[in-house]
Amino acid sequence: MKINSLSKINFKGVYLARNFEPNSQYTLACEIAKSLRESGESDKYEKQGKDLLVIPIDDNLVGVKVKKAKISRLTDDNYSRWSGRF
C-alpha cells in the first residue's frame, strides 16, 4: 500500500474507551462519537492537536475528555479509534 493512499483514510480524532458496559451506555457512547464526527467537532479538535476520548463515568453516564493528541494512542489497547470508514 502506498503512503499517499493511507493519507486518504480519515479516522477522526475520536476514541472510544473499551470498558463500556454492554448496554445503553455503549450505545450512547457510539452515538456521541458519531455525532462528534458528523458535526465536524472532531476535525476542529484534531486540527488543534487534540483527541476526544469518550469514556464511561458510571453505570449510565458517558463523558468526553479533551486530551493532547499522542501518537501512542493509535496503538493503545484501552481505546478504539475506528470510525467505520475507509
Image (cartoon, rainbow, N blue to C red):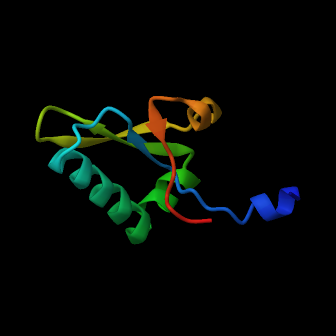
* Image x and y of residue 23, in percent: 18, 46
In which quadrant will I find the N terminus? bottom right
Location of residue 70 by image quarter: top right
- Say whether residue 57 is left or right of residue 74: left
Q: Is residue 39 above or below residue 66?
A: below
Q: Residue furthest front?
A: 22
In percent of the image, x 64 and y 35: which residue is there? Answer: 71
- Say whether residue 59 is left or right of residue 56: left
* Image x and y of residue 57, in percent: 19, 33
* Image x and y of residue 73, in percent: 56, 33
- Say whether residue 45 is left or right of residue 72: left
Location of residue 69 by image quarter: top right
Q: Residue furthest right?
A: 2
Question: What number of labels is visible?
Answer: 0
* Image x and y of residue 25, in percent: 19, 45
In percent of the image, x 16 and y 50: which residue is there? Answer: 24
In percent of the image, x 30 and y 37: which residue is there? Answer: 55
In which quadrant will I find the C terminus? bottom right
Q: In this view, does 62 lie above or below 45?
A: above
Q: Nearer the viewer, residue 38 or 44?
A: 38
In percent of the image, x 22 and y 53: which residue is there? Answer: 28
